[in-house]
Image: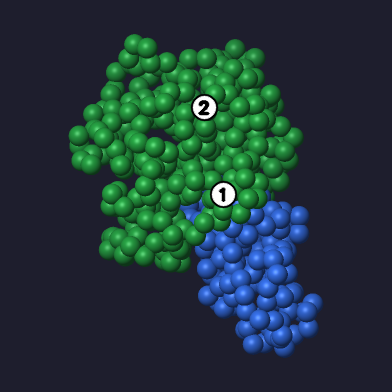
Chain colours: A blue, B green
């Protein structure tokens, strides 16, 4: 049997639980990061048709995970609309790992952070 | 431009027209399908460099790794034929991005042959290589589903969004989105900025007269489930060669199977209805290929 790529329209539906932004701001950094790690894994799992637990957030680039331009755009917009943050598409696509995105969101959604585009290390 | 005016050549290449050469008035586009079954097992990645091999093994999904390897083997073997440089000796570099200066601009060859430009794209089960004497960008995308189109449509130019919204819902809208997006990304790759430039900044919709000046944009028929386009700097090329890269050319060259020494000698008629040229005088097109 030959492996077939699953068309985008047929990808399995991964349950995504969106964390509450206000609640995130009340959490300590580590707990906030864990919550966002879970959320980003779910979003990536949904996009890529894989189990969230299979998403390697540390050692795999976004490209290696399978995030191309359209998937990157979808990820960007889903996160922006659910968490009310701003992301830079180019930075999402070129990220060395999903952890970079998670770290940026953790910082952005803390209690004392001013909203600005999540630039993965750019000054905010 | 009236697409029906574009003649389709389905006979053998004319006298003096040679494959694997770069010509100022021609663009060569090579469609590469990922091999399956025994073909996938025979895929020869031995000519890839260390960076490419690392990237190939880093993919989480095996099909992504197969597609990446297929695309890069095809690219190296094609460039080898066009340049005379052995496939394993080809060295790539990135030009500075015109937008930010970072080294993620257009790819080019470290050993610069006179006036050869190329672009590579891969998605789903398809790769596309474009080769020309002028800067160009190509893009191929697996067609997105309804939900993805709905989420991503906001990235488009406002007039593209209107065109998309006016299209038939369902898979047909995915085709429209794919067409717009591949033109857009091909253009941005040709420009050298990639997606560091906002996708909403430039119009690449149905009105070809409003496309970015100085660029010719071509929709490329590439089979079911995918959309593809090329953007070429300058006036519309007189000839657009669209060929299918034979699977046999992906295999080890010491297996007795042919190297890519000669162009595909079978001809496949590719519908002219799907070829769009912007800013062009009427062009001859030579759809050729083999399976």
Residue ID for mark 1 = B98
* B88 is higher (above) or lower (below) than B33: above
B263 sits to left or right of B83: left
B173 sits to left or right of A49: left
Which mark is on residue A69? none
Residue A20 position by quadrant: bottom right
Q: Is residue B43 visible?
A: no
Judging depth in this view, the residue of B260 and B118 nearest the camera is: B118
B139 sits to left or right of A16: left
* B265 is higher (above) or lower (below) than B128: above
Give the residue drawn at x 54%, y 50%: B194
Judging depth in this view, the residue of A75 and A84 nearest the camera is: A84
B9 sits to left or right of B68: left
* B60 is higher (above) or lower (below) than A80: above
Residue ID for mark 2 = B115
Give the residue drawn at x 47%, y 23%: B22
* Quadrant location of the C terminus of chain B in the rendered image: top left
Callout 2: few (<14), some (14-19), or many (20+) C-alpha neighbours within 10 Å? Answer: few
Identify the element where label 2 is drawn. Answer: loop
Residue B284 position by quadrant: top left
Identify the element where label 1 is drawn. Answer: loop
Name the spot of residue B76 as percent of width and height, x first: 60, 28
Give the residue drawn at x 63%, y 83%: A21
Name the spot of residue A37 as percent of width and height, x first: 70, 70
Judging depth in this view, the residue of B153 and B56 nearest the camera is: B153
* A103 is higher (above) or lower (below) than B119: below
Q: CA distance from mark 2 to mark 1?
A: 20 Å
How many badges with numbers are in the image? 2
Q: Earlier in the sequence, mark 2 or mark 1?
A: 1
Give the residue drawn at x 38%, y 16%: B17
Chain of the residue under the numbered disc 2 shown in the image: B
Residue B229 position by quadrant: top left
């Amino acid at each position: 049997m030959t492996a077939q790529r699953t068309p985008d329209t047929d990808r399995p539906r991964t349950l995504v639980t969106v964390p509450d932004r206000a609640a995130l701001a009340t959490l300590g950094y580590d707990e906030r990061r864990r919550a966002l790690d879970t959320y980003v894994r779910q979003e990536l799992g949904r996009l890529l048709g894989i189990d969230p637990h299979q998403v390697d957030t540390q050692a795999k680039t976004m490209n290696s995970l399978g995030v191309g331009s359209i998937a990157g755009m979808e990820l960007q917009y889903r996160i922006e609309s659910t968490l009310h943050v701003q992301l830079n598409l180019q930075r999402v696509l070129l990220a060395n790992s999903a952890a970079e995105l998670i770290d940026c969101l953790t910082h952005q959604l803390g209690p004392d952070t001013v909203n600005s585009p999540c630039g993965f290390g750019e000054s905010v | 431009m009236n697409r029906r005016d574009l003649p389709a050549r389905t006979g053998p290449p004319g006298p003096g027209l040679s494959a694997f050469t770069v010509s100022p008035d021609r663009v060569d586009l090579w469609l590469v399908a990922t091999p399956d079954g025994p073909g996938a097992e025979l895929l020869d990645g031995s000519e890839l460099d260390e960076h490419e091999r690392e990237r190939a093994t880093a993919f989480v999904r095996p099909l992504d790794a197969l597609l990446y390897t297929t695309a890069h083997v095809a690219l190296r073997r094609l460039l080898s034929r066009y340049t005379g440089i052995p496939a394993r000796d080809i060295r790539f570099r990135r030009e500075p991005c015109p937008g930010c200066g970072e080294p993620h601009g257009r790819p080019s060859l470290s050993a610069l042959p006179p006036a050869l430009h190329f672009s590579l794209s891969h998605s789903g089960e398809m790769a596309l290589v474009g080769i020309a004497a002028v800067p160009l960008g190509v893009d191929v995308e697996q067609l997105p589903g309804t939900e993805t189109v709905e989420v991503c449509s906001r990235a488009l130019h406002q007039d593209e969004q209107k065109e998309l919204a006016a299209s038939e819902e369902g898979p047909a809208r995915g085709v429209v989105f794919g067409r717009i997006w591949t033109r857009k990304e091909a253009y941005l790759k040709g420009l050298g900025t990639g997606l560091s430039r906002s996708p909403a900044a430039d119009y690449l919709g149905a009105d070809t007269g409003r496309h970015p000046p100085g660029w010719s944009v071509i929709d490329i028929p590439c089979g079911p489930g995918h959309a593809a386009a090329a953007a070429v700097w300058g006036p519309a090329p007189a000839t657009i060669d669209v060929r299918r890269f034979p699977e046999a050319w992906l295999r080890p060259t010491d297996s007795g199977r042919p190297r890519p020494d000669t162009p595909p000698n079978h001809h496949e008629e590719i519908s002219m209805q799907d070829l769009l040229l912007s800013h062009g005088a009427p062009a001859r097109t030579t759809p050729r290929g083999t399976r």
